[in-house]
């Protein structure tokens, strides 16, 4: 990047700190309409969100403007004069050969000159990232410029999409995936859809999707059957044992022993000669597990005069297990009709990763009809299957998978020792170890303060949409490098679908308008005005009651 390109002087540094700088706008650009033209583009001098280059001898620091204010004083003629100032966040250095490097090692001193940066210079900074042809939106400060990200950093090192309800998270997720498929036609993504936003059925059962029909596979979790025998010991404990029960430790120990026995029995039947553990994914009878607990719980000796050592220890467990088993909502998990033998696992995994009868880039797993209290366990099972699949896949480096977790705070919570502690540990394990085996995670959440700290700490890139909650803002600020923390102050002013991109996937912190997805997800806000003016006069309440009772959503 040559010095001649940054030829429009707009100000002078007045203060330099390790985490930011301040500058006074030059007098000629302090008027009511400080328009400057650079690279054929008209823009305001000192516009928030625009870039500047601070030059002093061999120092060239690129900085982002994030704040502007005025200070009045009177000149010698007693006329009111306003001096304008801007606050700058240094994001990197421009080297003599024109290349851009993140981080600042050589700071300028007060008095250094501040120059406007035009489209041509921005292109030089972003050129390396544009080579991937993976674009997600337009720069807020330069609408004609399209932002390209580094897909290796974004998908290979985990990412987070954060923003309050209505800020455009589903929009951003859809747009991101649509553009991922365009740039990388052999994408492998598993999307946990908690609200039926990305794939949905109309009244006649036709499936509609926010993604190309030939690239997406819709899987209803209730129809898919996620059989209980694929769950790990920790997940089964979460499902059947109340950790607050005084006999919980005894129940867990006994379950471990019985599972070991049942799985050894199955291993012999299918010809497995290797060691079997309690987490080996092979079939076992849930009814047999229940009966073993029941027998131990009712054991009596000497014609009923002496009770067994475990007599009455499993009352709570048996009630909890029976209630789960009798609840029709859990049939997809506890009463599999298709995947009721060890041999059905291969077909499940093929469907799961998009290698089934229909080859697909994206597998959308619809969890909207799954009971709320069981979603965390099912979500963890989906994540674990993706992790285990590639862990044992000899060609894992050629077949990386990304798991996108919608509403992640619901099943990867920050709190410790909760009901789904096993679920949380599994997802955190993927975050910490998954990228070594070609499994990454993209977490999507409206409440980062309720999301696991371990999970967010493993993310290297952040797409932050509008956030007005002070606690969430402060938390996001703590996630990014200190020098970029002040950028989070603009989160309250972002429009729908507008985001602040931070981290390794972008060359520098960038405010961007995410492309409008086409087609859009089914997540538009309800139009109260139209509905309350032109809505139906009556409803089929009988149908609503029936759907409620049968747990069927339309």
Image (tube, rainbow, N blue to C red):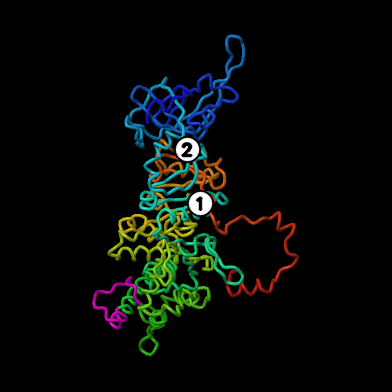
Q: Is residue 257 magenta?
A: no
Distance (Cα) linking label 2 and label 1: 20 Å
- Secondary structure beneath dot 1 equals helix
Q: Residues within 10 Å of mark 2 (few under 14, many from 20)?
A: many
Q: Position of residue 7 (x, y in %)?
A: 44, 24
> Residue under circle 1?
172
Whole-percent x, y for residue 53 in the image:
42, 29
- The location of residue 180, given as percent across then percent down, is 43, 54
Give the residue at the far top of this rendering.
Answer: 76
For discs 2 and 1, the disc positioned in front in the rendered view: 1
Image location of residue 440, percent across then percent down: 37, 56
**Which residue ends up furthest to the front in the rendered image?**
40
Q: Residue at x 45, y 73 (%)?
A: 225
- In the rendered image, which quarter contains the C terminus? bottom right
- The magenta stretch is 264-282
Q: Quadrant of the N terminus?
A: top left
- Residue at label 2? 487
Mark 2 or mark 1, which has the lower sequence index? 1
Is residue 107 depicted above or below 372 in this figure? Answer: above
- Please tell me whether residue 275 belongs to the stretch shown in magenta: yes
Comparing 259 with 302, the one in front is 259
């Amino acid at each position: 990047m040559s010095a001649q390109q940054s030829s429009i002087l707009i100000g002078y540094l007045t203060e330099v700190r390790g985490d930011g700088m301040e500058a006074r706008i030059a007098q000629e650009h302090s008027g009511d309409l400080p328009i400057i033209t650079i690279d054929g583009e008209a823009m305001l001098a000192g516009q928030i969100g625009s870039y500047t280059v601070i030059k002093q001898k061999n120092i060239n620091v690129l900085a982002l403007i994030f704040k502007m204010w005025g200070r009045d004083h009177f000149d010698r003629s007693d006329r009111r004069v306003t001096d304008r100032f801007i606050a700058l966040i240094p994001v990197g250095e421009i080297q003599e050969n024109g290349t851009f490097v993140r981080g600042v090692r050589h700071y300028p001193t007060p008095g250094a000159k501040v120059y406007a940066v035009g489209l041509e210079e921005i292109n030089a900074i972003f050129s390396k990232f544009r080579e991937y042809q993976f674009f997600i939106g337009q720069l807020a400060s330069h609408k004609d410029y399209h932002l390209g990200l580094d897909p290796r950093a974004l998908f290979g090192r985990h990412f987070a999409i954060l923003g309050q309800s209505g800020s455009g998270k589903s929009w951003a997720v859809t747009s991101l995936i649509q553009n991922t498929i365009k740039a990388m036609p052999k994408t492998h993504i598993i999307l946990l859809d908690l609200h039926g936003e990305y794939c949905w059925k109309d009244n006649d059962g036709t499936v509609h999707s926010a993604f190309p029909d030939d690239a997406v596979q819709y899987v209803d979790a209730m129809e898919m059957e996620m059989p209980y025998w694929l769950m790990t010991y920790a997940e089964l404990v979460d499902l059947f044992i109340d950790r607050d029960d005084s006999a919980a430790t005894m129940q867990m120990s006994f379950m471990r022993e019985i599972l070991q026995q049942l799985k050894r029995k199955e291993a012999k039947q299918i010809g497995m000669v290797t060691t079997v553990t309690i987490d080996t994914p092979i079939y076992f009878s849930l009814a047999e597990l229940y009966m073993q607990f029941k027998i131990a719980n009712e054991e009596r000796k000497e014609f009923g005069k002496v009770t067994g050592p475990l007599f009455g220890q499993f009352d709570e467990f048996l009630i909890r297990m029976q209630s789960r088993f009798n609840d029709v909502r859990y049939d997809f998990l506890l009463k599999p009709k298709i995947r009721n033998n060890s041999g059905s696992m291969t077909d499940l995994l093929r469907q799961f990763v998009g290698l089934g009868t229909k080859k697909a880039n994206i597998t959308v797993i619809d969890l909207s009809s799954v009971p709320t209290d069981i979603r965390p366990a099912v979500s963890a099972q989906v994540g674990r299957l993706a992790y285990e699949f590639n862990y044992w896949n000899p060609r894992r480096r050629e077949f990386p998978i990304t798991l996108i977790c919608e509403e992640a705070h619901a099943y990867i919570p920050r709190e410790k020792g909760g009901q789904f502690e096993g679920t949380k540990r599994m997802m955190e394990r993927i975050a910490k170890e998954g990228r070594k085996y070609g499994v990454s995670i993209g977490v999507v959440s409206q409440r980062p303060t309720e999301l696991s700290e371990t999970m967010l700490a493993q993310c290297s890139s952040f797409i932050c949409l509008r956030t007005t909650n002070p606690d969430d803002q402060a938390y996001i600020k703590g996630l990014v490098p200190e020098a970029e923390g002040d950028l989070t102050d603009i989160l309250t002013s972002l429009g729908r679908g507008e985001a602040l991109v931070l981290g390794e996937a972008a060359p520098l912190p960038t405010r961007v308008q995410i492309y409008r997805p086409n087609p859009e997800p089914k997540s538009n806000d309800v139009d109260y005005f139209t509905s309350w003016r032109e809505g139906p006069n009556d409803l089929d309440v009988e149908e609503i009651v029936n759907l409620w009772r049968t747990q069927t959503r339309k």
